[in-house]
Image (cartoon, grey):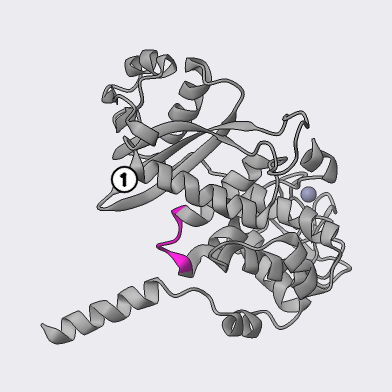
Amino acid sequence: MRILQEINTEIMEDRFRSLTIFEFQSRFPDDDACFKYLTELKWGTGFCCPQCGHTNYCKGKRKHDRQCTSCHRISSPTSGTLFHKVKFSMLKAFYIVYYVSTNAKGISSTELSRKLGLRQKTCWLFKMKVMKAMKSSGNFKIEGNTEVDETVVGGQEEGVIGRKNDKKKLVVFAIERKGKGVSRMYGKVIKHSSAKELGDFMKSAIELTANVKTDQWAGYKSLSNDFENLIQVPSGKKGNNFPDLHRAIMLFKGWLRGIHHNVEYLQSYIDEYCYRFNRSNMKEGIFENLMKRMVTNLPFSYKQIIA
Ligand SMILES: [Zn+2]
């Protein structure tokens, strides 16, 4: 029995172990190792020409490129992925994915710039691509005990008096409660707390059969037609009807102030935060998971980022 317990403890510890910087460095000593890894991720199950669908290839001019033997189109391990047209070393790009995925709180572009010797703007742009890969796939909806509420994020800076306050954004959050805590969390920036906008978010993040709790806001009322187990509870003083949800929101806001300092790209920040939060119990695979998403997400240009 004791032996079994010890083994169990070991497995648990292993499960919560994140990829250490030492392991990362020995796995990825140089650009070549990064390209090999990308090649395996992209073509590990076989090559397929993006132009004609042919599956035979020969070597391209550059080391890791592959050329279709039918239409002669050349593909690189980065083409068609979020690593497309990265203008700095692939190793540094890998470091950014590593830091963003394994740091419990993420990392600011200023700190990345200091660590990697790249311009802050360069780090910021690439990090926006990483954050795109962190956007929820919508494949894992919340199923259990769910709480939903809206909150205002951003707003007037302290000490700045009289400036027009146009930086506030409305966000709707949903959490899943498990045991004594919050096991999952999703959020979306919305324009109005209308039934339409609240409903669109809830249907994308929550299973229709989940036990959903909201406050008594009219916008949620008609949603009980879709969510069969939705109940509306009266708001307590200072929102103490949903203590877990409000604590989760407060932690998010604290993180946002510390890392991003603004709400301009708030949806990306929410996606980044929720991605890490929802995977905090499976740290070991988080880097690999994010790399896979980087390779399967289509390229994302500077114009699309600032749009
Ligand atoms: Zn081809």
Residue 36 appears in view:
yes
* Mark 1 close to ligand 1, CB under 8 Å: no
**Residue farthest left in this picture:** 1
The quadrant in which the C terminus is found is top right
Which SS does the magenta portion mostly show?
loop
| Horizontal relation, residue 141 to residue 143: left or right | right
Q: Is residue 123 above or below residue 217?
A: below
| Horizontal relation, residue 230 to residue 259: left or right | left
Residue at image coords 46%, 22%: 199
Q: Is residue 29 above or below residue 37?
A: below
Q: Residue 150, how many percent across, how many down? A: 48, 31
- Foreground residue, 8 or 49? 8
Q: Total of numbered circles in the picture?
A: 1
| Region of the chain picked out in magenta, as a range | 278-283
Crowding at dot 1, Cα within 10 Å, few <14 / some 14-19 / many 20+, comes out as some
Residue at image coords 55%, 79%: 20
- Foreground residue, 230 or 34? 230
293 is within the stretch colored magenta: no
Residue at image coords 27%, 53%: 180
Q: Which residue is mark 1?
A: 177
Type of residue at label 1? Arg
| Quadrant housing residue 103 | bottom right
Q: Residue 108, how many percent across, how many down? A: 70, 61
Q: Residue 166, how many percent across, how many down? A: 73, 29
Q: Residue 12, how many percent across, how many down? A: 32, 74
280 is within the stretch colored magenta: yes
The quadrant in which the N terminus is found is bottom left
- Foreground residue, 209 or 35? 209
Give the structural element (helix, strand or loop) at label 1: strand
